[in-house]
Amino acid sequence: MASVGFTYTGLPARVVFGTGTRATVRAEVERLAMSRALVLTTAPQIDHGREVAALLGERAVGVFSGAVMHTPVDVTHAALDALRQLGADGVVAIGGGSTIGLGKAIAVRTGVPQLAIPTTYAGSEMTPILGETEAGQKTTRRSLDILPETVIYDVDLTLGLPVALSSTSGINAIAHAVEALYAQDANPIISVFAEQGIAALARALPAIAAAPNDREARRDALYGAWLCGMCLGSVGMALHHKLCHVLGGTFDLPHAETHTVVLPHAVAYNAPAAPEAMARIARALGAGDAATGLYELAGAVGANRALGALGMPAEGLDRAADLATGHPYWNPRPLERTAIRELLERAFTGAPPR
Ligand code: NAD
């Protein structure tokens, strides 16, 4: 417990968690006074979207399956057209962070209520944060209007999440909790969620890699993802999230995979400045050292550990280091360009963190 005072702000979301919980979607939509819901999803998850629409019966007016990565504004406008044409009065987003991002983009522009049914571990459903892209530029904003009113976590929907995406999405979630433990506005409440979230995912991910239909492991992972999402939504992030934002935005690297590669290196960089957080991360991982434990977890679940293999160009590393250190932001260890360039080099080749 912190020896000085602290501030904690709770986020007002209703959560239904369990197995088979998507069956409650109609009752939950009624609770939000939605009578004409537009269901949102991606093209590959159209069957998930149709199933939810069927569960909603006459409370659904259509399925928009155009959600894509990075929430491009032109896709949002197409979904808004569908919302107006169908006379929808709310959105139900079923999918990962991309689909939930589209729901947020619609809600913040129209004020309609949103219900999110996450099928990955990214955690967007628990945050009042929206990242959008227009003409290659990514902008991020934060507002309570962005936070979904209701979230239904259904373990069954994650059984089909491919192992590779389960592993990287799960480590993406762990990254939120890791940075929450050394956040500028860290507080003991969120730190409890963070440690529990890391422990649940660290236990679950190797079990899922070995047996993707292991319901207990899937339950642990989804529960951990919820806790980690609350960390991201509640306190500020630091170097790790900045690096991933730069790498994803400038070099178009995939979101969860990039987080997986960078996390052990960002943690090693911050370790000398955040010993208490490192001890909690290591304890949650059941490892002797936080950075090594994260690197080994990625290896144990078969995830790629090199930026080079994700399509990062070697000649982009200098630019990435410049962008990650160009504008000041809070980090437990001051931003040192030379050390961050070295960190990126190790992440590029897949070397262990140092
Ligand atoms: P994603 O939503 O892009 O999903 C990746 C692919 O997997 C999609 O094709 C999706 O349809 C498919 N998929 C998802 N769940 C599946 C399942 N259960 N079975 C089969 N296929 C499934 O990936 P993501 O990692 O969840 O989200 C990444 C995006 O979310 C990024 O744009 C990121 O910036 C954003 N994000 C935002 C926040 C926030 O707080 N605003 C937080 C985390 C992530």
Image (cartoon, helix red, strand yellow):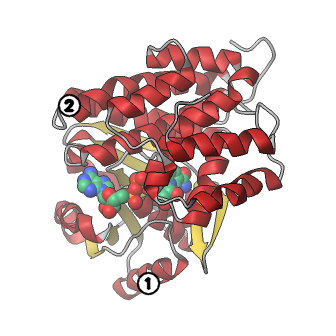
Ligand 1, what quadrant? bottom left
Which residue bears the numbered disc 2? 210
User: Is label 1 in a helix, a strand or a loop?
Assistant: helix
Whole-Å distance between the Cαs marked 2 and 1? 40 Å
Per the image, label 2 sits on a secondary structure element best described as helix
Q: Is residue 238 visible?
A: no
User: In x, y percent, where is residue 29?
Assistant: 33, 58
> Where does the image place residue 23, in percent across and percent down from the top left?
20, 49
Foreground residue among 65 and 284? 284
Report whether 61 appears left or right of 191: left
Q: Quadrant of the C terminus?
A: top right
**130 to 128, vertically: above or below:** below
Q: Residue at x 62, y 45 (%)?
A: 345
**First in residue order: circle 2 vs circle 1:** 1
Kindly tell me whether residue 2 is visible in this rendering.
Answer: yes
- Going by the image, does 316 lie left or right of 206? right
Nearest the eye: 49 or 15: 49
Above or below, 79 against 264 in this view is: below
Q: Which label sits in the foreground, 2 or 1?
A: 2
Can you tell me whether the CB of the residue at mark 2 lies under 8 Å from the nearest atom of ligand 1? Answer: no
Residue 74 at what x, y percent from top left?
50, 82
Q: Are marks 2 and 1 in contact (CB under 8 Å)?
A: no
Q: Nearer the viewer, residue 67 or 142?
A: 67
Q: Compared to 221, does 151 lie above or below?
A: below
* Marker count (numbered): 2
Q: Which residue is mark 1?
A: 78
Task: Assess disc 2: are there few (<14), some (14-19) or many (≥20) residues with their C-alpha within 10 Å of its C-alpha.
Answer: few
